[in-house]
Image (cartoon, grey):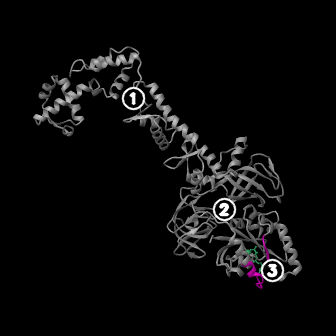
Amino acid sequence: MRPVVVGTAGHIDHGKTALVRRLTGIDTDRLKEEKERGISIDLGFAHLKLPSGRRIAIVDVPGHERFVKNMLVGATGVDLVLLVVAADEGVKPQTREHLAIVDLLRVTRGVVALTKTDLASPERIRSATAEVQELLRGTALSGSPVLPVSSTTGSGIQELLEALDRAAAGAEGREARGVARLPVDRVFSIEGIGTVVTGTLWSGTIRPGDALVLLPSDRTVRARQVEVHDQAVDAALAGNRTAVAIHGVSRDEVARGEWLVTPGRFRTTTMLDVRLNLIGAAESPLQNRARVRVHLGASETLARVVLYEPDSLAPGASAFAQLRLEGRVVAVPGDRLILRSYSPSITIGGATVIDSSPIRRSRLDVAGKARLETLESGTLVARLLLLVGESGSQGLRAEAAALRLGVAPEDVVAAAAQTTDLIRTRDGRHLTLGEWGRALDRVVGAVSDYGAEHKLRHGIPKGELKSQLQRELEGTVFDEALETVLRDGRLQVSGDRVSLPQAGPSLTEEESRALERVERKLGSSGFQVPELSEVLKELPPGVKPGEVVRHILEAGRAVKVTSELLYPTHLWAEIETRVRAHFARRPALTMAEFKELLQVSRKYAVPILEQLDRTGLTRREGDVRSPGPRSRQ
Ligand SMILES: Nc1nc2c(ncn2[C@@H]2O[C@H](COP(=O)(O)OP(=O)(O)OP(=O)(O)O)[C@@H](O)[C@H]2O)c(=O)[nH]1
Ligand SMILES: [Mg+2]
């Protein structure tokens, strides 16, 4: 069964706490001051088993107008509201304010308890019932059942339990998949256990042993023990009133308003783009740049409201706006928050988070407005396409998209599978098809540009290509794009070099003639090859010597022994054949023997032998060479 949290609401002294005690046997007024003054000040917590067997948690809130900010903390995360109205007094200011708050938080299920019926005449009970029904009209709680009860005599309590059971059965569940997110509404410490935080788990699951982080303070902690309904559990699920004993912080380092979340998955922000709704009962229009109190989860943060369109917003109206917060908050699209005026603190409206990492701006252009409209009410596929499009060639991972869209990563993967306009890279990035096509074109284009610029080279080394494009294409995106164009035959690779297919180096006639001449020269005097610088002197003015040498080497037409000695490949092969033949007869090769073998002077013999050592055909041992590892192949 889905966990359900019931929150009380209603005017001071109307009997919320007495009713909770009657229902659960738990006195939620724990503080000494509450006992002394006979009113609730802070939140109280209880739980109960309904007739169906369903367990529910109850958050009892204070009705006093000075403690509405505590009520707000209690109301956040509530699935079902238990609105308490005393029959003898009827609807009062905080009846209205609390109702407005739960309505702004989009709590859509409710039960009204008309309390203190033992103090009211049947006629009074009837008129109070009608008054409440009238009040509910036009809110999400319109049509909720109104049940007359007395906490003193117990009359109507059974019927109320049954009504709660029916309402709880229809409550929507929360997202137990995905990342854990719990607004901390209470912190205390227990001897021998340490710091304990409590709250309603908004999403995900928390298990003993989980690594978690507190935001915005950014403290890493570990869950030691997890409790739901005062019982240790293996896992608290989304929707559970949860107590977590945490290791890693002292009681003084945590406060109400922080979030206990999965590490590395949430970013705090000081700006939010929202849909703002001013309540109809607001006393005056909301002015652009007004300073307000933003209540989100258990947090309260001051902010300025930047109204994008009108300069002021009339009571009952709604508009896109940007909240510039004075502190950091943890927000996800779809989150609902409450706005109260700075002074006096009165509830003036609510807002729904649309973009939790917006750009700073004061006006919306047509495109900006269309974008917010899509993010607000587009399909998940449309919203995903929009964000992926904005991520460019970086791409957007499912987890990051999920947080920016306020859904579970699985939903992002499913949405991505529904459209042919996205591709998913091997490392999990989503790119639009257009962006992917551009990435492929960039890779091919860079190779083609390189070929045009360096006609004598056999393509561009992969590493060089990658670093050339690193500003435009993220490393893994590059790797996969290159692989794709190679597979599609748009490029070819030979060794480490990438080139256009069939695009050997294209030489001008002059260049190829020069090249031939150099090769002929190098091969014209046996093993005593002429010095390279001498050969290159004869090149015509338009041909670059360095390019010619690189071309010859890359084409495998010569072996470089020193910067001055290039041996045409057929000559080099002959040298190696002679050395192998020598080792077939003798175990060692002296310098004198080698000079004899090739009919060359020491000037050639030394560098050639060193090259043979380097390539492993020979191994130097003092003055003689013995067969190297390659000689056995
Ligand atoms: N006769 C009678 N008295 C009630 C009933 N319910 C509550 N009371 C009394 O009304 C007073 C206020 O009740 P609470 O339950 O503290 O009211 P509350 O709504 O929790 O008040 P706050 O938390 O301060 O907003 C107490 O003295 C209760 O004993 C009822 O059904 N009948
Ligand atoms: Mg109370």
Query: Front-most of 319 and 622?
Result: 319
Q: In which image quadrant can residue 618 be found?
A: top left
Indicate the secondary structure of the residue bearing disc 1. Answer: loop
Indicate the secondary structure of the residue bearing disc 2. Answer: loop
User: Could you say where residue 326 lies in the image, as x and y percent from the top left?
Assistant: 67, 53
Residue 43 in the magenta stretch? The answer is: no
Label number found at residue 297? 2
Tell whether circle 3 marks a residue whose Cβ is less than 8 angstroms from ligand 1. yes
- The Cα–Cα distance between marks 3 and 2, rounded to whole angstroms, is 32 Å
> Is residue 399 found left or right of 539 in the rendered image?
right
- The Cα–Cα distance between marks 2 and 1, rounded to whole angstroms, is 62 Å
Indicate the secondary structure of the residue bearing disc 3. Answer: loop
Q: Which residues are magenta?
A: 144-161
Q: Amino acid at mark 1?
A: His
Q: In which image quadrant can residue 435 be found?
A: top right
- Label 1 sits on residue: 458
- Label 3 sits on residue: 116
| First reached walking from the N terminus: tag 3 or tag 1 | 3
User: Could you say where residue 534 lies in the image, as x and y percent from the top left?
Assistant: 29, 17
Query: Front-most of 264 and 238?
Result: 238
Residue beneath the point at 55% across and 38% down: 437
Q: Is residue 42 visible?
A: no
Q: Are marks 3 and 1 in contact (CB under 8 Å)?
A: no
